[in-house]
Each structure stands twice: as structure tokens, then as C-alpha cells.
Image (cartoon, helix red, strand yellow):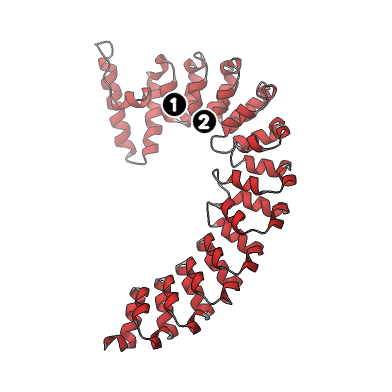
Amino acid sequence: ERQEDRAYVLACCGKDGRVLQYVGEEFREDREVVMAAVAQHGAALQFASEEMRKDKEVALAAVRADPLALASVDPELQGDKDVVLAAVRGDAWALAHAAEELWGDRDVLVEAMMSTADVGDVLESFAPGWFKYDKEFVFVAIAASDRKSILQVYAWVEKTLKEDREIVMAAAAKSSAILQVAPPEMRNDREVILAALRCKDGAKALKMAPRHLVRDRSFLMEAVEVDGDALKYAHEDDLNNKRLALVAVNSNGRSLRLLSRALRDDIDVVTAAVQEYPRALRYASDALRHDSELVNLMCEGTAVETRGDTRSVYTDKMSDYQDHELERGGGQEPRTALSELVEGD
């Protein structure tokens, strides 16, 4: 039969490794056939002979194709660092099939953390307790975390390190929510707050900062340089400070919406905001929203954002603008593509 034809079996396994479960025993212990099968479908290793599952090169090929194929390798290879590293680089949860002595291997844990968004779950499931006290390891865990997992990672850390200023700063740079669970004195620390401002939605850090710090103009200047939206928590007087406003809109053009009416009518401030974020023109005063030079600047910037045909996008929008200008004063203004960009929905 054709199944007995080695060349045919080899070709079939190379196309679909699952074929290995249907072939004769002599092919399941044929190294070339098994290698072809597991390279195509790592889980096919479970159908290989016991001898093949003890072969390190076969195991490596299998876990590179499917990290969870580590469950099917010989127990001795489940304790082989090279094989386990290859597996966890593809899927951190392959560590569940590794020999437990490798759960305490720093290199293996680091690779596992780097390959998943669930860093906290990996630490809680596999990392021996002594790693909670290892500051260098904790820094690596924080670096591997994202905004969603950092709170779980910080909760896992040993109490003394939770109070370490460098650890708190590193964690706060991932999520300002760390400030809610960090020691109270950290919320009074200027550098910790500034670190928290650098993360996504970092402006919320100012909500947890003491009032005396937020009212400190030099600190606020540093804060809006990191993220203009820090103005959300500024005192009303600060929203009318032009120098502060320029720093804020150069950092985040959207922060124009937070400024006083007078500054939203200031040509320098609005120009800087539109240069940073073209659609910020919608937040300007009525007069400046229809300033031809600012509209021109917005159209050029928006055209670049589209990454399409800059000339045609620019021309179309300018045409809309000219039509809009011609019809001004003659009843209701037309709702053009340009006015939607300037005024919003």
C-alpha cells in the first residue's frame, strides 16, 4: 500500500503532521518522518515512538512549532533547560509541563514573563517565593508587565520592596493606579508622580497628588511637559498662564480644550496645538477656527495623518473650506468634511 511507501509518508507528514497518528510503527520511529511531522505540527510528537520523544532535536523542533508539545516530550527532556527555554519563548504556559526544578531558574522565568501579557499569573503560578525578595528580578518583572498586569505584579512583590522608591517609580511608570496601593508617602514624592505621568492615562496621577504639589508652578510645568492633559487637575489660575499653556499643547495638542477662553483665542497657543495635533483646531475660539492660516496648517497635518495622497486630501479639504467661506452669512453654514474636522461631531 502507498502508506508503506516511505517517500509518500514523509511527504504527507511534511504537509500535515497529524498524519503521523495513522502510519505504521516503523514510521513513528523514523527520525526523518517524525521530524517532518513535528516541524509542521508540534503536537504530533504525541504519536511518535518513545525513542523519538527522547530525542532532543525532535523535541526542540516540536516545541518550536507548538510550545505546548512540551507535554509530550520525555520527562528527562522536560527538565532540559534548552528545550524548556525554546517552549516558554513561544508560550509562557508551557512552563506547566516543565520539570519543577526549572520553575526556579531565573532565565526560564524571565523568558516566560517576556512571552506573555499575564506576567502576574505566571509569577503566582510558577515563581518560587524567594524571587519576591530579589530586587533585580522584580525590576525585570515590572519591565515585562503592561498596564493591566502591573497591579498584580506589584501585589506579588514582598512588602519591603513595595516600599522601595525605585520599585514604586518603575511600577508607577506602567500605571498611575500603582499610586493607589503604594505607601502614602510615595504620593508626596515629586519624582514618583512624574514617573506615573509618563504612562498611558498618566495625567490621573495628579488626581492622587497632594494639592500643594499640584499648585507648585514649577512642578506643574514639568508635569504638562510630560503630558499636557495634566492640566485637567490644574488650578483655574494656571489655565490662563500662556507659558504653561505653550508647554502643554506642545506636549499634547488636545490639551487646548482645557485652557481658558482667552488662551483658546491666542494665535500662538492655538498654532502650537494644531502643529502637535491638527484636529485641535476644533477646540479654538470661533474666530481662530476659521483663520485661513490655521485651517491651512490643520489640513496639511491631517493629510499627513491619513498617509494617503497628501495633495488630493489637501486639495479636497481646501475646496471644502473655500466653499464654506463663500456661503458664510447666507443661511446655515454647510456641514463639510472640513467643518467636521474643525468642529468635531
Query: Mark 1 or mark 2, which is nearer the start of the sequence?
Result: 2
Q: Residue at x 56, y 56 (%)?
A: 114
Q: Which residue is mark 2?
A: 252
Q: Amino acid at mark 1?
A: Ala
Please determine whether, in this image, residue 133 is positioned above or below residue 204: below
Identify which residue, 295 or 99, lies in the foreground.
Answer: 99
Residue 199, image quadrant: top right
**Is disc 1 surrounded by few (<14), some (14 to 19) or many (20+) residues within 10 Å?**
many
Please determine whether, in this image, residue 290 is positioned above or below residue 75: above
Residue 176, image quadrant: top right
Q: Amino acid at mark 2?
A: Asn
**Is disc 2 surrounded by few (<14), some (14 to 19) or many (20+) residues within 10 Å?**
many
Q: Residue at x 58, y 49 (%)?
A: 145
Identify which residue, 274 or 111, lies in the foreground.
Answer: 111
Query: Where is the N terminus found, in terms of image quarters?
Result: bottom left
Residue 220, image quadrant: top right
As drawn, the residue found furthest toward the right would be 160
Please determine whether, in this image, residue 260 is positioned above or below residue 196: above
Residue 280 numbered mark, or none = 1
Identify which residue, 333 or 128, lies in the foreground.
Answer: 128
Identify which residue, 263 or 219, lies in the foreground.
Answer: 219
Q: What is the x, y in percent for residue 311?
A: 32, 36
Q: Residue at x 60, y 70 (%)?
A: 99
Q: CA distance from mark 2 to mark 1?
A: 9 Å
As helix, strand or loop, the secondary structure at mark 2 comes to loop
Query: Where is the C terminus found, in terms of image quarters?
Result: top left
Q: What is the x, y in percent for residue 260?
A: 52, 15
As helix, strand or loop, the secondary structure at mark 1 comes to helix
Q: Are marks 2 and 1 in contact (CB under 8 Å)?
A: no
